[in-house]
Image (tube, helix red, strand yellow):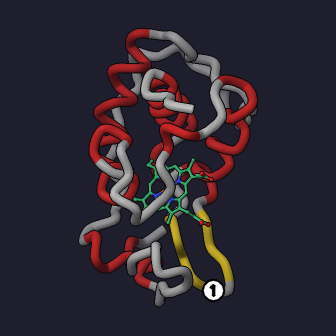
Amino acid sequence: MAGAAFALGVGGPAVLAPLSAHGDVTPQPVDTSKLPDIGAAWLKANPYRGNADAIKIGQSAYGQNCARCHGLDAISGGIAPDLRYLDKDDAGDEWFIQRFQHGSARDGKVYMPPMGEALGQKAGWAIRSWLDTKYDG
Ligand code: HEC
C-alpha cells in the first residue's frame, strides 16, 4: 500500500493529532530472520513471549515504526494510547495483533496505519514481546 494512502484527513478526538504531524509514516522494514518461522496464518497469541532475540528486535522495530505516535520507550505523550497499559499475555495479544495488522480507521479517517502487510506478523510479535517487558498495569 502506498504511503500516500495514510495521508487521509484525520480529525476526531482532540487527543489524536493529524498523521501529517508525524512526518513519514512509511513502515520501516524489520529483520526477523533470526526468529523461528510461524507460518503465514495470523496467530492470536504471542509465539515469542520471553524470547530474548524477539525482545531485542521488537525494541528496535518499535522505535522505528511506533514510537513517533506511541512515544519513546512506550511512554505515550498523549497522541496515541500508552501501550504499557495493554493487557498482558494472552489477554492482550489478540487485540494487539489486530491493531498491528489492520491499524485503526473510523468514519473514513485513519488513526493508525495498518502495519501487518508491510512488516509481517513476526515483527508484530517481536514488538509485542518487547512491550510485555514494559507492561505497567
Ligand atoms: C501514525 C500514528 C501511529 C503509528 C505510527 C502507530 N500507531 Fe498504534 N495507534 C495510533 C492511534 C491514534 C491509536 C488509537 C486508535 C483508535 O483510537 O482507534 C493506536 C492504537 C494502537 C493499539 C491499540 C491500543 C489500545 O489501547 O487499544 C495498538 C496495540 C497499537 N496502536 C500498536 C501499534 C504498534 C505496535 C505500532 C508500530 C508497529 C503502532 N501502533 C504505530 C497511532 C499510531
Q: Can residue 80 be seen in this view?
A: yes
Q: In terms of image quadrants, where is residue 109?
A: bottom right
Q: Is residue 122 visible?
A: no
Is residue 49 found left or right of 16 in the rendered image? right
Q: In this view, does 120 lie above or below 114?
A: above
Q: What residue type is labelled 1?
A: Gly
> Which residue does the image show at 48% across and 10% down from the upper left?
51
Crowding at label 1, few (<14), some or many (≥20) Cα neighbours within 10 Å? few
Is residue 104 found left or right of 120 in the rendered image? right
> Which residue does the image show at 47% across and 89% down from the upper left?
9
> Which residue does the image show at 38% across and 13% down from the upper left?
53
Q: In this view, does 38 lie above or below 98?
A: above
Q: Position of residue 64 (x, y in %)?
A: 28, 46
Residue that extends furthest to the left in the rendered view of this protein: 23
Q: Position of residue 79 (x, y in %)?
A: 40, 65
Is residue 127 found left or right of 73 in the rendered image? right
State how many labels appear: 1
Q: Where is residue 8 in the image (x, y as percent from the top left)?
A: 47, 86
Q: Does the residue labelled 1 lie within 8 Å of ligand 1?
A: no
- Which residue is at the front of the view, 100 or 78? 78
Q: In terms of image quadrants, where is residue 34?
A: top left
Q: Position of residue 70 (x, y in %)?
A: 39, 53
Q: Mark 1 points at which residue?
A: 108
Q: In this view, does 29 lie above or below 88?
A: below
User: In terms of secondary structure, where does tag 1 sit?
Assistant: loop
Q: In this view, does 8 lie above or below 32?
A: below
Q: In which quarter of the image is the C terminus?
A: top right
> Which residue does the image show at 40% across and 62% down from the upper left?
78
- Which residue is at the front of the view, 27 or 103? 103
